[in-house]
């Protein structure tokens, strides 16, 4: 299969927070990979902006080290790396003051796409937007990119939206949820809307329930200060898992167009029922395997923050009434595995006597690792033993099916930054979408805070707290095993 790389227009991209962790781990390596692939025109400029007093060469050295560490060796090409670094420059800037803004303005060119990546604390969004405007650095065509966390509740998200809206139109604001940049997440839409096969069955009449799992093996060691204020609900559910749920549950948009897609996602979020306390299980990992437990990684030894959460979510609309969505995510679990499993209902009438051999059809979409799809179907067990049934997988690994291209899946950030330059907002969250997601999340969090609920301890390397099993058993269902 021949990869189709369509170059973007030349651009000037300013990365505020250019010396920070995200820039070094994701943004710069991602840009390099796109440059290596031939997607970035040679006359594009990347300008790092941060507080540190660095010169261009110092910033290029940082970028060189980031490429060495975070880009696969097969893409290390000395000539290409030097050509890329030559496009990098740096301005020391004071987000809250006057220093550096004239120097930045002097670097920006007319006639190219101008994009500003706010890879900084959200408390600085307003200052940056204000100064870009006051110094006439941004124009009506410029784009700004903002990262999560986009607020920590509805009120703070509204305040951030308002601060950005003072100087930028919604069409200029690109709110990143990196899950939307993952190839396999976009594949959810391709699977649903480019095949006739699934859509007729995609409703509560035929689907018993949906499980969405994002399991991680990492702990929050080193990020305790952030995580204490966030927890799994804010860190993963309000954004990433909500997006997965929307892509599974939304109606077909009339076109793969930014607002058409986002309108449909918004309708799903608005149709989510409030979650009952008995449909929520929160957990916190305990010490184990010579590693500390959550409280040792937290700044607060009495922390009640959840590192695991499972929820039963109901969607009140015609398509989904009666089909629960079970969501679970956690740190320090037994494997890193993200998947969506759609379990279909029983056929209306069985003509076979082998009731014991029968299993439900399940469509599993594996998001990471081992990206692919698996459809569990019933067949006849081979042999002369009568009509006995057995279940087999129709298993497709994207890497195998797509060859080299499938094995070399680009990082989410690569795709998303190129979309910013192309001016395509389909895979970015709109302001009203983010607010609606917080409007659903807030009462859930307020509920457990008011009740003073404590998370249940779970062993590191396990599948999460026992109570999460009950959430399913109660309904006569079972979680799928968490494994790579
Ligand atoms: C981030 C969360 O947004 O997503 C992290 O803050 C989490 O806590 C990460 O580990 C998971 O992303 P991925 O791409 O590794 O699945």
Image (tube, grey):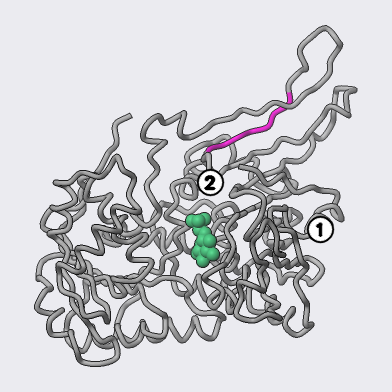
Looking at the rendered image, the quarter that the C terminus falls into is top right
Q: How crowded is mark 1: few (under 14 residues within 10 Å), some or many (20 or more)?
A: some
State the mark number for residue 368.
Answer: 2
Q: CA gap, disc 2 to disc 1?
A: 25 Å
Q: Is residue 292 left or right of residue 389?
A: left
State the mark number for residue 466.
Answer: 1
Kindly tell me whether mark 2's CB lies below 8 Å from ligand 1.
Answer: yes
Q: Is residue 232 left or right of residue 256?
A: right
Q: Where is residue 193 in the image (x, y as percent from the top left)?
A: 50, 43
Query: Looking at this view, is 440 or 32 the one in front?
Result: 32
Q: Where is residue 341 in the image (x, y as percent from the top left)?
A: 65, 45
Q: Is residue 119 left or right of residue 142?
A: right
Part of the protein shown in magenta = 372-378
Which quarter of the picture shows residue 201? top right
Q: Does the segment drawn in magenta span residue 373?
A: yes
Q: Is the magenta stretch mostly helix, strand or loop?
A: strand
Badge 2 marks a residue whose secondary structure is strand
């Amino acid at each position: 299969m021949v990869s189709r790389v369509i170059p973007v227009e030349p651009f000037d991209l300013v990365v505020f927070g250019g010396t920070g962790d995200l820039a070094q781990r994701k943004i710069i390596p991602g840009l390099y990979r796109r440059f290596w692939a031939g997607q970035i025109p040679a006359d594009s400029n990347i300008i790092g902006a941060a507080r540190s007093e660095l010169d261009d060469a110092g910033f290029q050295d940082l970028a060189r080290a980031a490429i060495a560490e975070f880009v696969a060796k097969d893409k290390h090409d000395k000539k290409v790396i030097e050509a890329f670094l030559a496009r990098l420059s740096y301005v020391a800037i004071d987000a809250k003051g006057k220093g550096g803004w004239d120097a930045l303005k002097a670097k920006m060119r007319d006639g190219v796409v101008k994009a500003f990546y706010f890879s900084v604390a959200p408390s600085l969004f307003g200052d940056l937007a204000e100064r870009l405007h006051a110094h006439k650095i941004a124009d009506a065509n410029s784009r700004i990119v903002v990262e999560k966390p986009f607020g920590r509740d509805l009120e703070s998200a509204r305040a951030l939206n308002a601060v950005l809206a003072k100087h930028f139109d919604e069409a200029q604001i690109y709110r990143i949820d990196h899950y939307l940049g993952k190839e396999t997440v976009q594949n959810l839409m391709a699977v649903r809307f480019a095949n006739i096969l699934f859509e007729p069955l995609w409703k509560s009449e035929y689907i018993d329930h949906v499980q969405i799992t994002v399991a991680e093996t990492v702990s929050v060691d080193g990020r305790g200060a952030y995580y204490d204020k966030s927890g799994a609900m804010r860190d993963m559910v309000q954004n990433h898992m909500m997006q997965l749920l929307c892509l599974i549950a939304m109606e077909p948009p009339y076109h793969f167009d930014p607002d058409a897609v986002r309108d449909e996602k918004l309708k799903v979020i608005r149709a989510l029922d409030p979650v009952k306390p008995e449909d929520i299980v929160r957990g916190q990992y305990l010490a184990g395997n010579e590693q500390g437990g959550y409280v040792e990684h937290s700044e607060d030894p009495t922390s009640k923050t959840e590192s695991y959460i499972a929820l039963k979510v109901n969607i009140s609309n015609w398509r989904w009434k009666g089909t629960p969505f079970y969501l679970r995510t956690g740190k320090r679990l037994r494997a890193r595995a993200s998947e969506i499993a759609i379990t279909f209902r029983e056929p209306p009438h069985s003509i076979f006597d082998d009731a014991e051999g029968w299993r439900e059809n399940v469509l599993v979409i594996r998001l990471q690792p081992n990206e692919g799809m698996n459809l569990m179907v019933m067949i006849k067990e081979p042999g002369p033993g009568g009509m006995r049934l057995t279940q087999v997988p129709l298993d497709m690994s994207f890497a195998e099916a797509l060859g080299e291209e499938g094995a070399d899946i680009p990082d989410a950030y690569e795709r998303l930054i190129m979309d910013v330059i192309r001016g395509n907002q389909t895979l970015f969250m709109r302001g009203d979408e983010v607010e609606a997601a917080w409007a659903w999340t807030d009462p859930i969090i307020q509920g457990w805070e008011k009740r003073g609920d404590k998370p249940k301890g779970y062993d590191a390397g396990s599948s999460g707290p026992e109570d999460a099993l009950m959430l399913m058993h109660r309904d006569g269902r079972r979680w799928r095993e968490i494994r790579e």
